[in-house]
Image (cartoon, helix red, strand yellow):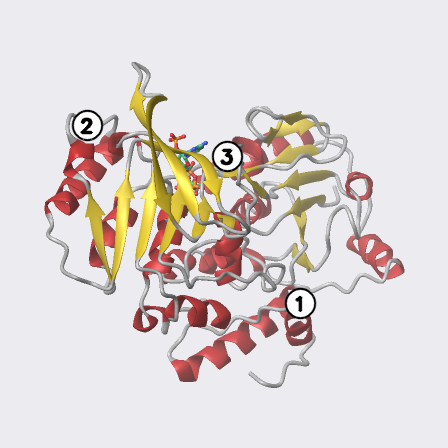
Amino acid sequence: MSPLRVAVVGSGPAGFYAAGALLSADVPVQVDMFERLPTPWGLVRLGVAPDHPKLKTVSKAFERIADRPGFRLLGNVEVGRDITPEDLARLYDAVVYAVGAQTDRRLGIPGEDLPGSWPATEFVAWYNGHPDYQDLVFDLNVERAIVIGVGNVALDVARMLALTPEELAPTDTCDAAIAAIGGASIKEIVVVGRRGPAQAAFTTPELAELGDLAGADVIVDAADLEGAESTDTNSERNLEVLREFAAREPSGKPKRLVLKFFHSPVAILGERRVESIELVRNVLDENNRAVPTEDRSMLSCGLVFRSVGYRGVALPGVPFDERAGVIANEGGRVGPGLYVAGWIKRGPTGVIGTNKKDATETVELLLEDLRDAPRKGVTADDVDALLDERDVRRVVYAGWLAIDEAERSAGEPLGRPRVKLCTWDALLAAAEGLHSSA
Ligand code: NAP
């Protein structure tokens, strides 16, 4: 029987783990991976904080998958613009959407859209060199920045704001962000959790790291920890670290990174841009939910980063679970020939490795459905013909390797892992071998 041809949409961890599972199947499979950017790896390249290079080494596993026979990267091809979901359904035996959660959750409070109030996701995309976010201007010349939410993204943002030029220098943070963060006048970063320290979503290694920052003292109010009862092992370890932080005397580092619990934002205020935030004190009910009290307070600030989670975006014509923000699915199966993996399947939770089990589960169902089914008989050449007809300038894996090489060789003399190319033009030129300055 001819190979099963599968389109995987999205080249982040879920997409690559799905491709890996497909290419290990007991029947021949060909995978075309569609990616709208000229670069693969999704949030491993554009989400993981640049001062966490070890987390990025997972891309080595993805490189091995990309090297396997039957794999093709079709970068710079946007599903919905260059090729439609209907085209994919016609051209492939199956389609796996692994498109992540492409927007951020809203707070739903007045002032949320004032200049100076940002979704954390945009700041993250900017400092990581995402080509769609380089025109954003983050004015970091403020005294105090607020980060709403106590997940790992909130800690990434708070930590990045606190890094010294020396800490930033050996990273692949984009140059504009190195300059802006290194020259920022921020004195205090306040991370605000609506519930208690035992309910915080961040994980212990990420929390503990805050205690070792060169340029910022971490501040925790011991009163927030009184009576805190852990809910699981992570929470127990977090509490230990937080108690240690609360017992510290600030050592007079130039910045303060404050972890504040039991407060929700009520409004973000300012004439033309963010000047302050109004918070309300919460108590916990018997189900550990935050319940507001009458106790309100104001905190002056020039920046607010809203880090309260990501949210999936619906695909036209595909049933969407609005409450969970995911494509409605059962174990990754959506409908005939249509599957999902990763955050668009289960919601924006878990670490990179969580996607391996998740994607494998999807692929097992896909193979159960299609292993013995008749093939559509459409070939890679048919897909190329359609993309050629539409003049789609795609970046195949060799093009990414050329970008990778240009970035790494620019980083080497500077002792940095890479200097990222941050514009579409530079990325496409490098992919086509036209980049000369690196
Ligand atoms: P997250 O872990 O779901 O955290 C979201 C935070 O926002 C929670 O503290 C949540 O509090 C809070 N929140 C939600 N709605 C709120 C509201 N209306 N007002 C105030 N606070 C609100 O999400 P994330 O930080 O975006 O991370 C996404 C996933 O990526 C997570 O699984 C995370 O671990 C992972 N990640 C991992 C790393 C790493 O391993 N280093 C780095 C970055 C991200 P409640 O609990 O009260 O809802």
> How far is disc 3 from disc 2 in space, using C-alphas?
26 Å
Residue 107: image tag: 3
Discs 3/2, front: 3
Alpha-carbon span between mark 3 and mark 1: 32 Å
In the drawing, does residue 286 fall left or right of residue 328?
left
Of callouts 1 and 2, the N-terminal one: 2
Amino acid type at circle 1 is Trp
What is the total number of numbered labels drawn onto the structure image?
Answer: 3
Does any portion of residue 351 appear in the rendered image? no
Secondary element under disc 1, as helix, strand or loop, is: helix
Point 69% across, 65% down: residue:
395
Which residue is under mark 1? 424
Foreground pick, 103 / 404: 103
Residue 393 sits above or below residue 146 on the image: below
Within 10 Å of disc 1 (Cα), the crowding (few <14, some 14-19, many 20+) is some
Quarter containing ligand 1?
top left
Indicate the quadrant containing the N terminus: top left, top right, bottom left or bottom right: top right
Estimate the x, y position of residue 132 in percent, counting from the top left.
63, 59
Mark closest to the chain's N terminus, 3 or 2: 3
Q: Identify the residue at horizontal 38%, vertical 70% (top origin).
A: 182
* Image coords of residue 409 (percent x, y): 49, 80
Q: Kindly state the secondary structure of the residue where label 3 is placed.
A: loop
- Front in this rendered view, residue 47 or 177: 177
Instruction: Please indicate whether residue 246 sits to the left or right of residue 365 in the image.
Output: left
Q: Which residue is mark 2?
A: 228
| Sequence-first tag of 3 and 1 | 3
Identify the amino acid type marked 3.
Leu
In this view, the residue in front, 115 or 15, is: 115
Is 101 left or right of 284, judged from the image as shown?
right
Please name which of the two marks, 1 or 2, marks the residue nearer to the observer: 2
Under mark 2, the amino acid is Ala
Q: Alpha carbon of mark 1 to alpha carbon of mark 2: how far? A: 49 Å
